């Protein structure tokens, strides 16, 4: 049903917190996501011309890289992973004509029921973030499932019941949790580090948050005071004497 | 946005069909002969149905299209489906009464007009609702869709009723006025489109990445070196030159030529022929207009690419 | 949402999990391979998912992009299927598939003849080998001196500089103390061999809020997340580091106690210019180096009880010679104003203020933020220390340092900096991974020679002690080895010079070879300099129409560029289909706090007629009757590699694997072979781990508890003293040879550069290529970086990874773009003294303004890797290698040196100097292009790939 669920008191808002200060842009989350999901939720994430001239495929998570040039410092690169942000006011859900696209009341995960999807693509048009892709073969809408088939999966060891991308991230730049609970680790991280929404002006109220890069300045610590005019003997060697005596 | 032929064809032709139904419903003069009535009904029915059918061609799963009527409470696409079906049902009743009993029922007519207009409006709202495409998100979008659909209806009506007179004016004249109105609206739509950028939402690469506060942000590397669904569907680029050429064609075939032809019609000789040609030219012009409607539209996702 | 209750949040994942070791790169992480019935009803198992092994010491559950794409590698259409015999011309890639018996017969014939006549006519080079302790041993039994793996073109400068200086090394021989460090400096690293550990470490520093300073011309990846960036000009790190040394010495911010106890800083260096002793250590009768004892003012052996060594001054020895402590020379050298921040600022492209600020940060971290751990330990002199004192400054460096012709000295300079700060193997510093520390005198010496039918006296590779050990013919000039390692060209080569083998064999200099036998190295493509030239050398024929390099045997697992040039191809399995040992006798996977080794095992059976290369070597060894591989009765000693892994003993009780030794598997390190050893590893998740005792965790170079533990573990046979060599005596010895004062005398051709480059104290000299060309002609630097999501050439066959890196642009600094009128999307000609390539351009500003770069090894030859001829890798992708020559531009005397470090012979990939200009608008195709090779395998299917479709029904949410 594509009306958005009304917030039940105590309902979770599960999502990711992505740390742009730590992400090294290694694509581990991207490929591990592909791997988990191509044989997981719904249709495989297919690839066209896999060994041909124009290899292309459906992915649920992609890492962009941006170059940011501050007014007063050298340009820097910020690696930028992006998957569905499981928005509170998800336009992709309300525009869906079939009810295939829906947001779960209990945990806020936005999903596509592929059996109901007609592949009209309107939800992808409605998403400002480019978080939805039609599978080139199955022709149904694919998107990040927040690994709904891992996080509640009794066939997986407790400790691994987190999204595949979160488990695999070698730089620990991805965090998973309940952002509705202000005491959760992720909520606290967001509070500490000033977690941001992407395109808040779109009014989608994303659940996923991004932690901004910490400021990178060329530090200007005061130079070390020389012991004495180094060349003049006494100088360093004199100091050395005293140092040796102290031992 | 990627201009999908099926969608272009759908919006234009169904617009024409519903435009004609709209006028029928209002009791606009129509042919009296059985053949003529049949022609009129067939044209209205075929255009709208053909349009609707073609719209299903761009679906990944047309066989599930029936599901699309279920979400009318939130989805304009769903609403459009529902309205189109209702309109066609009413049209069926109206056609039945008219064809077999020669009665043009006022009640059914009004109902048909209302629903036809609503359907076109819903179609337009599918686009106008999208915050992600500022060029579309304006009252001008439905206004243009409605005006063009009305215009198409009038030209077709004129063709059918041999440029019959309404309120002392020949249909061709009504059509010409409608063309002026429609293109006036479209001009201001283009006008706005030229400058709107992402100003409706204020989105930018800075807000899309949240990095704007640090400095000037530009893309360094795309996520993958090849194209993907998003770049093909939403980051579709079209050359400026290309666009302005198409605009000329749109205006020429969509406005100038039809108006001239309708003046020809006004001269009184074989108006039907003139109006038929006018209709053809107008359709072609609007295909170009509609192609640009998509091709020129910038989607928020392009901020990431 | 009751409409969607069909959603199954607890689907069945897999039928079985098999734990082994990843080989999508050399990091060797632990993986859980999930297998599942493939859904075809045949009962065949298929890989469902590969994830990191949570318990594994290397990756602790994480998995990188490459590792996560293992499925696509394992099922790659480029996999070889059967042994291949060349039918076309070399390079065409025309083969016929043959049976293993025929293949092994041919190989045995070729190799047998060589061994009988002249074993050195076999050049056996094993590229990206993770079983060098085995392949080297095999080559030793065969009797050829010509063995090495990829170290020489990779990062031998790091290994050599480290081992010579402190008995450990960067590379993956050690690691920063992520838990305690206060300040981390990362030099010239994009990805590293320690891929996942470094990322985990950086994450830990971020969590702890500790600072990382990245020194790198390019600001991507690790360098992008670093807190401070030093956009250094390539090849100048040595200057930068020695400027830091200058600042620290000037301010007296060095750990004098540490220097006295653990380094040769106090050792007396003879000052007798013009004599054969000049620059050597003053020693007593039993060869113990002398120091000045402050108590008596007299010379005394450094190790004498209670001696209080001085670090300065001058002394007249009994024999009248004058000597000064090494540290005295050191301070004289580095206090010179030539090393002052302002002096080096322009050359390095680093502002003097930033240099001084970093020096101050180092001093603050090391001395104000000193770490004290209450953990008593006893040093090797028997002195007990109540606490472990930490100087929490950690450093790591890799190819940005090593891949320059001054890499050895630059890497030594970094170690000097670490040691002056007292930060090696202390809490918060840089830590050894077992089996290190292992200083030169505890390492093998290199062995040459090679007599018909006899094994070699010892291992080919090792560490050169002194010029007397050089591997030269009687004339004292001609190298014994085909790659000229341990000759005057590369006297302290420690890993050989694989990048020179083909060139030298082609030039028959020092001699021609009969059989070139290679394994796992794409030498006709991305792992060679002057790629086009190498292809020619491999195909050139002599006057009678025979190939100049007569016979070429190659083992690969995939349809690579190199396969096309082989006469005989031995198809290997994928990493999931064979046994491997990641052994302590080799490049280990230990962590500073644990001794670790691991295995691979066939988690899937090959569906092709392929065999693990190591098993094939065992078989060949038996067929050739090589000692150690054959029983008295001439039968094979080992069934296969698995059998060797369990039963081979290097020394009694010491074998490839340290875990579960002894008949009952109860012993660790030392112990008799155990028939169930491999099973024990499998049951333990594919690895073994033995924790280092608390008392032995730090100061391993001088720690008694470590020594005892290491002996128990069989890591060493007795205590090994490890005094840090700030002053490196062998370098002084080579200088004496160059001055004609010592034997063997250096040939005139080499004298000058040995005098210039062999400073016993860490030194900086300008990279050679930059000196060889007109800087006005080639004003810019060009580099490559490892992409995190690609492994050299072998990632491009991977349907997932190639979508991420299908082609590579040249990233050109904004300044250069503006200067030559380039913008993103343009094509440009990039030229070097050697060649010209046409490449797509992308503008970039987060980079050193004189330096352009691209991703490494993305470009492919048409027809390789089972890719379509129109693949972007071949159409738009390119190799920088076409611009890099294995020889430097001719000198005035017409002499052409190899493009390598003069000390170790490390390939100087990053010395490259280039110019760039806009290319005329032609077709958008990178140049040069080469005729497509006929892959021995058909192109990959061009229909869509739907991995997992077999399971669709079960998984669909209905
Ligand atoms: N321009 C430039 N060139 C460089 C470098 C650079 O930085 N810049 N780096 C240099 C360095 S450090 C290195 S180490 C080299 C690396 O270059 P290479 O050593 O050539 O490494 P790869 O190309 O990854 O792989 C070599 C071959 O191993 C094969 N292979 C893969 N798996 C297996 C297997 O399981 N069994 C067998 N038998 N073969 C297998 C692959 O198919 C491939 O043909 O490149 C060097 N070249
Ligand atoms: N994903 C992935 N991982 C790999 C590999 C791979 O192909 N892919 N290859 C493996 C192999 S064989 C090796 S040898 C290791 C190498 O691992 P790295 O040492 O990371 O090798 P490179 O990618 O060559 O990175 C060299 C870095 O040094 C910088 N650099 C170049 N010149 C200078 C200089 O003069 N000074 C400084 N400070 N920096 C400089 C370059 O910008 C680049 O960032 O990676 C291993 N790991
Ligand atoms: S895995 Fe982690 S570090 Fe790597 S790209 Fe994804 S988020 Fe960034
Ligand atoms: S990110 Fe896009 S797809 Fe995901 S919920 Fe928000 S709008 Fe929908
Ligand atoms: S593509 Fe599928 S999910 Fe998206 S709007 Fe259309 S029907 Fe709904
Ligand atoms: S949560 Fe799961 S589906 Fe979503 S991006 Fe991460 S791995 Fe992919
Ligand atoms: S770093 Fe990645 S590719 Fe290398 S071994 Fe580890 S998981 Fe495998
Ligand atoms: Mo390497």
Image (cartoon, coloured by chain):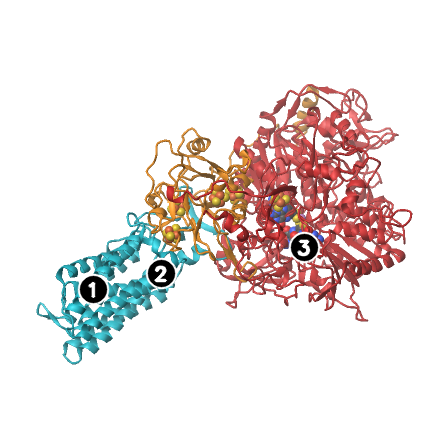
Chain colours: A orange, B cyan, C red
Tell me the chain of label 2: B
Relative to residue C184, is residue B302 drawn left or right?
left
Residue ID for mark 1: B21
Percent position of residue C481, x then y = 81, 53
- Which residue is most to the left? B168
Q: Quadrant of residue C699?
A: top right
Q: Earlier in the sequence, mark 2 or mark 1?
A: 1
Whole-angstrom CA distance, mark 2 to mark 1, is 22 Å
Q: Residues within 10 Å of mark 2 (few under 14, many from 20)?
A: some
- Which residue is most to the right? C633
Whole-angstrom CA distance, mark 1 to mark 3, is 67 Å
Percent position of residue C19, x then y = 65, 41
- SS of the residue under disc 2: helix
Residue ID for mark 2: B56
Q: Residues within 10 Å of mark 3 (few under 14, many from 20)?
A: few
Percent position of residue B124, x then y = 27, 57
- Which residue is most to the bottom? B269
Tags 1 and 3 both on a single chain: no
Whole-angstrom CA distance, mark 2 to mark 3, is 45 Å
Tell me the chain of label 1: B
Q: Quadrant of residue C697?
A: top right
- SS of the residue under disc 1: helix
Identify the disc placed on residue C607. 3
Taking depth in this image into account, of B104 and A208 the one nearest to the observer is B104
Tell me the chain of label 3: C
């Amino acid at each position: 049903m594509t009306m958005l669920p009304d917030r039940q008191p105590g309902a979770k808002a599960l999502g990711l917190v992505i740390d742009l200060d730590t992400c090294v842009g290694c694509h581990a989350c991207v490929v591990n996501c592909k791997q988990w999901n191509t044989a997981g939720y719904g249709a495989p994430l297919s690839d066209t011309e896999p060994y041909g001239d124009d290899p292309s495929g459906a992915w649920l998570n992609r890492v962009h890289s941006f170059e940011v040039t501050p007014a007063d410092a050298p340009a820097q690169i910020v690696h930028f992973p992006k998957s569905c942000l499981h928005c509170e006011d998800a336009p992709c859900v309300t525009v869906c004509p079939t009810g295939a696209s829906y947001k779960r009341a209990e945990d806020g995960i936005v999903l596509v029921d592929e059996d109901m999807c007609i592949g009209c693509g309107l939800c992808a048009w409605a998403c400002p973030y480019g978080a939805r892709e039609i599978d080139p073969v199955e022709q149904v809408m694919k998107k990040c499932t927040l690994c709904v088939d891992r996080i509640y999966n009794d066939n997986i060891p407790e400790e691994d019941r987190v999204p595949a991308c979160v488990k695999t991230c070698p730089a620990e730049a991805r965090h998973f949790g309940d952002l509705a609970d202000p005491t959760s680790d992720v909520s606290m991280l967001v509070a500490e580090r000033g977690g941001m929404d992407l395109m808040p002006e779109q009014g989608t109220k994303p659940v996923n948050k991004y932690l901004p890069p910490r400021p990178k300045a060329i530090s200007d610590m005061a130079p070390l005071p020389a012991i004495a005019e180094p060349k003049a003997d006494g100088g360093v060697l004199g100091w050395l004497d005293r140092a040796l005596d102290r031992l | 946005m990627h201009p999908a032929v099926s969608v272009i064809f759908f919006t234009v032709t169904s617009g024409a069909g519903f435009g004609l139904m709209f006028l029928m419903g209002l009791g606009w003069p129509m042919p009296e002969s059985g053949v003529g009535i049949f022609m009129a009904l067939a044209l209205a029915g075929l255009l709208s149905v053909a349009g609707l059918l073609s719209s299903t061609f761009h679906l990944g799963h047309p066989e599930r299209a029936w599901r699309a009527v279920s979400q009318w409470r939130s989805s304009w696409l769903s609403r459009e489906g529902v309205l189109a079906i209702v309109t066609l049902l009413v049209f069926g009743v109206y056609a039945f009464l008219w064809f077999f009993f020669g009665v043009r029922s006022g009640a059914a007519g009004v109902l048909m007009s209302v629903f036809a207009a609503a359907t076109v409006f819903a179609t337009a709202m599918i686009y106008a609702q999208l915050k992600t495409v500022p060029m579309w998100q304006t009252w001008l979008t439905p206004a243009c869709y409605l005006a063009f659909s009305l215009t198409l209806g009038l030209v077709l009506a004129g063709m059918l009723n041999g440029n019959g007179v309404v309120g002392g004016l020949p249909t061709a004249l009504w059509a010409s006025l409608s063309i002026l109105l429609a293109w006036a609206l479209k001009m201001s739509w283009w006008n706005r489109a030229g400058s709107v950028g992402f100003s409706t939402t204020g989105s930018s690469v800075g807000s899309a990445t949240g990095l704007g506060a640090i400095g000037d942000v530009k893309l360094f590397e795309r996520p993958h070196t090849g194209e993907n669904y998003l770049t093909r569907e939403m980051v579709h680029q079209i050359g400026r030159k290309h666009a302005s050429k198409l605009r000329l064609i749109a205006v020429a075939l969509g406005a100038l030529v039809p108006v001239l032809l309708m003046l020809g019609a006004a001269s009184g000789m074989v108006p039907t022929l003139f109006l038929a040609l006018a209709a053809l030219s107008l359709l072609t012009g609007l295909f170009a207009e509609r192609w640009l409607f998509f091709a020129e539209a910038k989607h928020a996702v392009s901020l990431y690419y | 949402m009751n409409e969607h209750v069909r959603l199954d949040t607890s689907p069945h994942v897999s039928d079985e999990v098999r734990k082994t070791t990843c080989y999508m790169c050399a990091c060797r992480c632990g993986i859980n391979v999930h297998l599942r019935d493939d859904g075809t009803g045949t009962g065949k198992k298929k890989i469902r998912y590969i994830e990191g092994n949570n318990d594994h010491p290397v990756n602790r559950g994480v998995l990188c992009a490459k590792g996560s794409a293992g499925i696509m590698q394992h099922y790659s259409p480029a996999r070889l299927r059967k042994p291949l015999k060349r039918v076309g011309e070399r390079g065409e890639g025309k083969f016929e598939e043959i049976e293993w018996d025929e293949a092994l017969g041919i190989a045995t014939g070729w190799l047998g003849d060589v061994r009988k006549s002249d074993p050195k006519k076999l050049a056996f080079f094993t590229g990206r080998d993770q079983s060098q302790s085995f392949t080297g041993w095999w080559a030793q039994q065969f009797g050829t001196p010509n063995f090495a793996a990829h170290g020489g073109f990779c990062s031998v400068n790091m290994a050599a500089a480290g081992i010579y200086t402190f008995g450990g090394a960067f590379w993956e021989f050690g690691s920063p103390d992520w838990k305690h460090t206060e300040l981390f400096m990362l030099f010239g690293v994009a990805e590293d061999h320690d891929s996942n550990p470094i990322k985990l470490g950086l994450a830990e520093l971020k969590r702890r809020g500790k600072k990382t300073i990245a020194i790198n011309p390019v600001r991507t990846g690790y360098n992008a997340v670093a807190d401070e960036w030093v956009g250094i000009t390539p090849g100048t790190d040595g200057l930068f580091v020695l400027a830091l040394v200058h600042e620290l010495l000037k301010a007296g911010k060095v750990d004098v106690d540490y220097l006295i106890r653990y380094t040769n800083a106090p050792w007396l260096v003879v000052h007798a210019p013009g004599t054969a002793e000049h620059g050597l250590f003053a020693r007593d009768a039993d060869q113990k180096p002398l120091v000045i004892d402050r108590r008596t003012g007299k010379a005394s052996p450094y190790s004498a009880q209670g001696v209080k060594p001085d670090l300065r001054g001058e002394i007249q020895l009994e024999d009248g010679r004058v000597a000064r402590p090494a540290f005295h020379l050191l301070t004289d050298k580095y206090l010179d104003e030539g090393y002052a921040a302002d002096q080096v600022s322009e050359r390095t492209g680093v502002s003097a203020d930033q240099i001084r600020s970093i020096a101050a940060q180092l001093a603050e971290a090391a001395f104000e933020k000193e770490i004290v751990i209450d953990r008593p330990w006893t040093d090797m002199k028997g002195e007990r220390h109540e606490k472990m004192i930490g100087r929490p400054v950690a450093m790591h460096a890799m190819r940005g340092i090593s891949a320059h012709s001054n890499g050895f000295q630059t890497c030594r300079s970094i170690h000097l900096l670490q040691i002056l700060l007292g930060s090696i193997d202390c809490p918060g510093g840089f830590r050894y991974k077992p089996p290190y520390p292992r200083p030169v005198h505890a390492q093998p010496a290199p062995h040459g020679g090679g007599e018909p039918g006899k094994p070699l006296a010892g291992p080919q590779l090792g560490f050169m002690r002194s010029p007397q050990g050089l591997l030269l013919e009687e004339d004292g000039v001609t190298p014994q080895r085909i790659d000229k390692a341990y000759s005057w060209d590369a006297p302290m080569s420690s890993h050989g010079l694989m990048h020179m083998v083909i060139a030298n064999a082609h030039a028959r200099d020092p001699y021609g070879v009969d059989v070139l036998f290679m394994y796992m190295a794409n030498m006709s493509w991305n792992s060679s300099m002057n790629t086009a030239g190498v292809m020619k050398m491999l195909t050139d024929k002599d006057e009678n129409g025979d190939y100049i390099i007569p016979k070429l045997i190659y083992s690969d697992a995939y349809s690579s560029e190199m396969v096309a040039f082989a006469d005989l191809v031995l198809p290997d399995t994928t990493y999931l289909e064979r046994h491997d040992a990641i052994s302590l006798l080799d490049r280990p996977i230990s962590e500073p706090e644990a001794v670790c080794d691991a295995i691979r095992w066939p988690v899937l059976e090959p569906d092709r007629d392929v065999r693990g290369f190591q098993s094939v070597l065992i078989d060949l060894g038996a067929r050739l009757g090589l000692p150690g591989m054959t029983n008295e009765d001439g039968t094979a000693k080992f069934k296969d590699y698995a059998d060797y892994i369990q039963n081979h003993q290097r020394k009694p009780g010491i074998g490839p694997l340290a875990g579960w030794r002894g008949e009952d598997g109860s012993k660790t390190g030392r112990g008799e072979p155990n028939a169930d050893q491999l099973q024990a590893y499998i049951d333990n998740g594919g690895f073994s781990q033995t924790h280092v005792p608390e008392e032995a965790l730090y100061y391993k170079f001088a720690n008694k508890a470590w020594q005892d533990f290491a002996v128990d573990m069989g890591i060493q046979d007795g205590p090994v003293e490890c005094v840090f060599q700030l002053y490196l005596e062998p370098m002084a010895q080579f200088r004496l040879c160059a001055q004609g004062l010592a034997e063997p005398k250096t040939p005139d051709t080499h004298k000058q550069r040995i005098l210039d480059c062999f400073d016993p104290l860490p030194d900086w000299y300008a990279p050679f290529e930059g000196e060889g060309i007109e800087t006005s002609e080639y004003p810019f630097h060009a580099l490559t970086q490892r992409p995190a999501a690609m492994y050299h050439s072998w990632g491009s066959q991977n349907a997932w990874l190639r979508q991420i890196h299908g082609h590579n642009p040249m990233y050109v600094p904004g300044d250069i773009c503006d200067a030559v009128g380039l913008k993103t999307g343009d094509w440009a000609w990039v030229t070097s003294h050697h060649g010209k390539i046409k490449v797509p351009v992308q503008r970039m500003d987060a980079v050193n303004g004189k330096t352009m770069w691209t991703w490494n090894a993305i470009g492919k030859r048409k027809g390789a890797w089972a890719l379509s001829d129109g693949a972007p890798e071949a159409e738009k992708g390119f190799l920088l290698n076409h611009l890099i020559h294995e020889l430097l531009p001719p000198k005035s005397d017409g002499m052409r040196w190899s493009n390598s470090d003069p000390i170790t012979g490390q390939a100087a990939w990053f010395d490259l100097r280039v110019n760039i200009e806009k290319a005329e608008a032609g077709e958008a195709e990178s140049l040069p292009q080469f005729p497509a090779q006929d892959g021995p395998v058909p192109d990959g299917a061009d229909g869509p790939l739907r991995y997992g479709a077999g399971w669709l029904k079960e998984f669909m949410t209905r």
